[in-house]
């Protein structure tokens, strides 16, 4: 397989970072820089950049600068996606973000990893595994989502969590490592009487 095919594959992989052509990152670096320099009133330009940067960019994808990613072409949004300030996505494998996703400030999605063996790390051996956020997921501030993880539909990840394994649908999960705490129930619905506007 060609390196580009491997990077875009739904399967995880291990390989040497130094073998990845640097020009594959160059476009994403340029586009992230342009995006992060754009003004808040340049909404049309921001959308143009996102359409060019991301592999699949739903029209309702909103990202607050500063945003960083490795390749961009491995990031796929599939509906309303709100990514807040200072997020980093190491998209060395595909990242799929379902509809109605809310990603808080400082969240990191890391497909990339390294060999645990020090000798191999020194030889640039790395690993990568895809990440999937299903529909209606909310990721709290400064959470880290590691490669190979799927977060189930409607789940909420608490601020500061480190997600190292799959999280089922419809739960609140938090901690280091992140674990389900409880199911989300009808009692979590905010009633109209509680709303100020």
Image: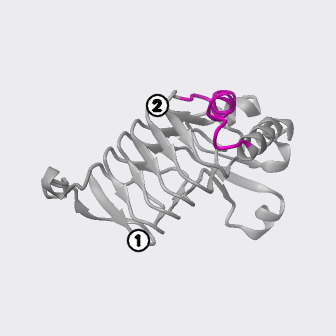
Residue stretch in magenta: 38-57
**Left or right: 24 with respect to 11?**
right
- In the image, 80 versus 22, the foreground residue is 80
Name the residue at 29% across, 48% down.
169
**Left or right: 172 with respect to 71?**
left
Name the residue at 13% across, 58% down.
187
| x then y, percent, for residue 195 | 22, 54
**Left or right: 45 with respect to 176?**
right
Residue 39 located within the stretch drawn in magenta? yes
| x then y, percent, for residue 104 | 49, 56
> Circle 1 is placed at which residue position?
175
Separation of marks 1 and 2 at Cα, in angstroms: 27 Å
Q: Residue 62 lies in what quarter of the image?
A: top right
Residue 16 located within the stretch drawn in magenta? no
Q: How is the image coloured?
A: one colour
| x then y, percent, for residue 121 | 77, 63
Q: Secondary structure at mark 1?
A: loop
Name the residue at 85% across, 48% down.
18
Checking the image for residue 78, the label placed there is 2
Graded by Cα atoms within 10 Å as few (under 14), some (14 to 19) or many (20 or more), the crowding at tag 2 reads some
């Amino acid at each position: 397989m060609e390196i580009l095919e491997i990077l875009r594959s739904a399967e995880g992989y291990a390989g040497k970072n130094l073998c990845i052509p640097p020009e594959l990152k160059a476009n994403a670096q340029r586009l992230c820089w342009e995006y992060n320099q754009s003004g808040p009133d340049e909404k049309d330009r921001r959308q143009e950049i996102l359409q060019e940067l991301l592999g699949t960019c739903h029209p309702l994808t909103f990202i607050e600068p500063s945003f960083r990613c490795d390749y961009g072409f491995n990031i796929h949004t599939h509906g309303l996606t709100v990514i807040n300030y200072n997020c980093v996505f190491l998209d060395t494998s595909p990242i799929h973000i379902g509809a109605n996703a809310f990603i808080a400030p400082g969240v990191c999605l890391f497909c990339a990893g390294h060999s645990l063996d020090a000798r191999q790390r020194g030889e640039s051996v790395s690993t990568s595994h895809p990440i999937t956020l299903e529909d209606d997921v909310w990721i709290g501030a400064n959470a880290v989502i590691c490669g190979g993880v799927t977060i189930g539909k409607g789940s909420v990840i608490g601020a500061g969590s480190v997600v190292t394994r799959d999280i089922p649908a419809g739960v609140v999960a938090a901690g280091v490592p992140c674990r389900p705490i409880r199911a989300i129930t009808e009692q979590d619905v905010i009633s109209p009487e509680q709303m100020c506007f």
